[in-house]
Amino acid sequence: MITKIAIVTNIPRSPSFLFYEDLLSRISRISEIEIRVVFGDNVDSDIIDAEVLLLFGKNYNLNRWRRVFPGALIGHLEPRSGHKNGLGGYDFIVVNSVESADFFSAYQIPIFIYPTFPVFDFRPSVADEEGAGRVLRIGYHGNKIHLDALFPRITTAINKLSKLVNI
């Protein structure tokens, strides 16, 4: 039996959404899950038989989605404290960290933790095989508050590492 999941978003270019979309599509390749993505507040005929709706973003008319999908489980995918959309009407939420689960535990609804780390291909490149250009690249996903929090603990560690490795 195939479980049909629809992900609804009004911010399809959000890095968090792109990570979730990629990771959830990987699940559908190895299990009996069909994932569909819907943009905006439109009810697409392709998802009319969805059993699970994941709403990503803010300001959804939850009552409307419940009327259109009366038997579906409806979850909020990565809610944010600033959305002020209330989570009381959702069946569950999906967050990306233990810290988020702790924060949203006050809503007293089931919480699933699904980390949104992007998948990288770590195979050596041609340059690595030739011994040229070996550089450690450090990526970052977050906001200015997170960047401010890097100082001094993480920035000190990166500076020490840069003396040993080309970053």
Image (cartoon, helix red, strand yellow):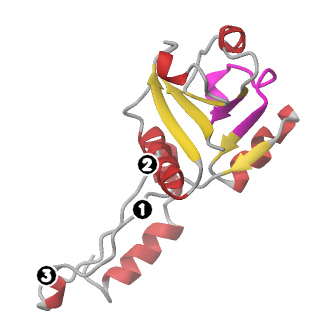
Amino acid tagged 1: Val
Give the foreground label among 3 and 2.
2
Element class at badge 1: loop
- Within 10 Å of disc 3 (Cα), the crowding (few <14, some 14-19, many 20+) is few
* Pick the front one: 44 or 19: 44
Amino acid tagged 2: Asp
Element class at badge 2: helix
* Pick the front one: 29 or 153: 29
x, y percent for residue 53 = 63, 28
Report whether 61 appears left or right of 35. Answer: right
- In this view, the residue farthest toward the right is 108
Residue 91 in the magenta stretch? The answer is yes
Point 73% across, 47% down: residue: 112
Asked which quadrant contains residue 120, the reply is: bottom left
In primary-sequence order, the first of circles 3 and 2 is 2
Report whether 166 appears left or right of 11. Answer: left
Q: CA distance from mark 3 to mark 2?
A: 26 Å
Q: The magenta stretch spans which residues?
A: 74-93
x, y percent for residue 93 = 72, 37
Residue position for label 2: 22
Q: CA distance from mark 3 to mark 1?
A: 20 Å
Residue position for label 3: 126
- In this view, the residue farthest toward the front is 1
* Pick the front one: 88 or 34: 34
Point 49% across, 33% down: residue: 36
Residue position for label 1: 119
Point 54% across, 41% down: residue: 34
